[in-house]
Image (cartoon, coloured by chain):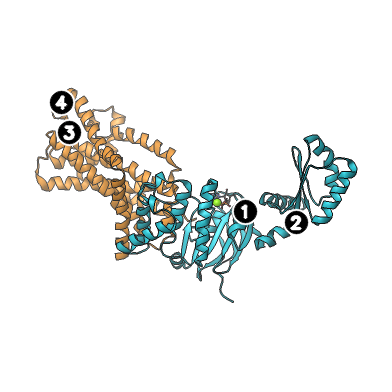
Chain colours: A cyan, B orange
Amino acid sequence: MAEPAISADGIRKTYRGAQTPALNGFDLEVPGGMVYGLLGPNGAGKTTAVRILATLMRLDAGRAVVAGHDVSTEAARVRQRIGLVGQYAAVDEILSGRQNLVLFGRLNHLGQARAVSRADELLERFGLAEAGGKPVAKYSGGMRRRLDLAASLIVSPEVLFVDEPTTGLDPQGRQEVWSALRELVAGGTTILLTTQYLEEADQLAHRIAMLWHGRVVSEGTPDELKATIGGDWIDLAFADADQARQALPTVAAHADGEPRTEEHRISVPVRQRTRALIAISTALAADGVEPVEVNLRRPTLDEVFLDLHRKQGDKQEVAA
Amino acid sequence: MTAVLGETWVLARRELTHWRQQPAGVIVNWLFTVMIALMFGGLFGGAIGEDYFDYLMPGMFALTMFFGVEATMTAVSTDAAKGVTDRFRSLPIHSASVVLGRCLADLMNSAVGLVVLVGAAAALGWRWQEGLGRALAAFGLLLLLRFALLWVGIFLGLVVKGPESVTMVQILVWPVGFLSGVFVDPATMPSWLGTIAQWNPLSATAAASRDLFGNPGLIPDHAMLLAALWPLLLTAIFLPLSVHRHRRLGS
Ligand SMILES: Nc1ncnc2c1ncn2[C@@H]1O[C@H](COP(=O)(O)OP(=O)(O)O)[C@@H](O)[C@H]1O
Ligand SMILES: [Mg+2]
């Protein structure tokens, strides 16, 4: 079997002065040549994991191997093989896009002429050829992100870390960054992508690990992940909030988890979709409060994390 | 070694590109000390005496070096805040290159600032009186002070949290500048203020430059020695602190 592009084993990291560890037994195995999504809410430890794997930060305990080299003992070798796109676009705002790429090209030890031609290639490829001469301060969020991506690809890295590439971007910027990332994947680079959005991981990643309080709590393909956690959800909409309130006890009785209500809507997790759907519809019809709209769907990330949160809370209560 | 030099030059040249991209900003910066010199020379010259301008100029040269702290600090903290420092650290370059590039860029900036101010002073009649050799020695001492203050600036840039703290240092720069032998002789100040001003590293460099340029002003004992020792002491303290801070970025 081929060696994984990234492997992390029991990484622990506690920030100076912090009460709880940012990473608490972080394990990860990323096979080469795929986009791997590291999915977690704000504060889960995504950035910490990326910074450790990219040799920017030391780990307290555990071991990590990236592109065949140990991040603790062979940091310089790792750095020759990776690219990093940090959570905030790390480009010089005073310089133009082209000047940035030439600068980073020179720092990757390309000669001046080669650095310039490589900069032009990359500007073209990321749709920045026209804006290449403008100072980065005048770029939109999506353009900065793409420039940031381009700067990480000056010498094709074996492994690319991309930390929350679309957080804070508008839908247009998000689309631009997604298509840039898709193109990279086609090129065969291994990418570790962190995100807070299930949709993004779903769109781009071949496999996903879910990070929760500094530890991977679930791992698999996007479909596997959604299937194992919480099953499906049924959304019901009623004529008004009063009707929804009336229907709630009946709906809750047939649900496999806590229902969530919002004005005239009720959402409930169910394990067996068809059976639950029939049971709820029949019971509501008998009560005389029929929904105006019924929808069966996969859980959203928010629901997945709320579910995890509840389980985590239950465990802590048991422990206490 | 040659790799370090090459990387250092590439990074220093980034600063030159900044000048080209935003010429107004740097030019205003260089002219700022000229304005201060004109203002104080004009305001106090009449009250203090005819040769006040000649007294003031070496102090202004030292002050120009001192103002560089702020420039270094701003550049370092901006790079850290924007993630540019992290990008440099993730590149296969020597970590010394990043710091040396900063050094070279800031020394170039201050040297140009000094040349502009010296040019303006000369146009208004200021002269060095004791030959080119001693004048060059004075410029050497001034740049030595700037070199020492680089490490203070890098340290502060790595310590401060964002642009708000930069503003604070920008304000603090003034009392430190005034409480020195830059504008007036510390001997004329109330005694406790005078003592503080006497011990201000700026005073030593200002006094030694006056001596070397042959400009008026009482030259305290050991001015030359202090002007050499102060920067070395500052470097001995702040260079290791900066290196330590830089290492701590990764912990
Ligand atoms: N420099 C720091 N000092 C102290 N605590 C930090 C620092 N950076 C992050 N943390 C904490 O570590 C945890 C993980 O943060 P982070 O890795 O940034 O999460 P994410 O990227 O998933 O949002 C959070 O609780 C955060 O508050
Ligand atoms: Mg983060």
Q: Residue furthest front?
A: A292
The lab-note entry on whether marks 4 and 1 share a chain reads: no
> Which numbered tag is attached to residue B49?
4
SS at circle 4: loop
Are the residues tagged 4 and 2 within 8 Å (C-beta)?
no
SS at circle 1: helix
Residue matched to label 1: A199
Side of B98 relative to B83 (left or right): left
The lab-note entry on whether marks 2 and 3 share a chain reads: no
Out of A27 and A11, give the one closest to the viewer.
A27
First of labels 2, 1 by sequence position? 1
First of labels 4, 3 by sequence position? 4
Closest to the camera, between mark 4 and mark 2, is: 2
Amino acid at pointer 2: Gly
Q: CA distance from mark 2 to mark 1?
A: 17 Å
Are the residues tagged 2 and 1 within 8 Å (C-beta)?
no
Q: CA distance from mark 4 to mark 3?
A: 10 Å
Side of A97 relative to B137 (left or right): right
Q: CA distance from mark 2 to mark 3?
A: 83 Å
Q: CA distance from mark 4 to mark 2?
A: 89 Å
The lab-note entry on whether marks 2 and 1 share a chain reads: yes
Neighbor class of circle 4 (other Cα within 10 Å; few <14, some 14-19, many 20+) is: few
- Residue B139, given in percent of the width and then of the height, sits at 19, 46
- Which residue corresponds to the image point at 22% horizontal and 45% vertical from the top-left? B112
Q: Which of the image's four quarters has the N terminus of chain B?
A: bottom left
Neighbor class of circle 2 (other Cα within 10 Å; few <14, some 14-19, many 20+) is: some
Beta carbon of the mark 2 residue lies under 8 A of ligand 1: no
Out of A252 and B188, give the one closest to the viewer.
A252
Residue matched to label 3: B55
Instruction: Write down the chain letter for disc 1.
Output: A
Instruction: In the rendered view, tell whether residue A88 sits above or below residue A27.
Output: above
Residue matched to label 2: A231
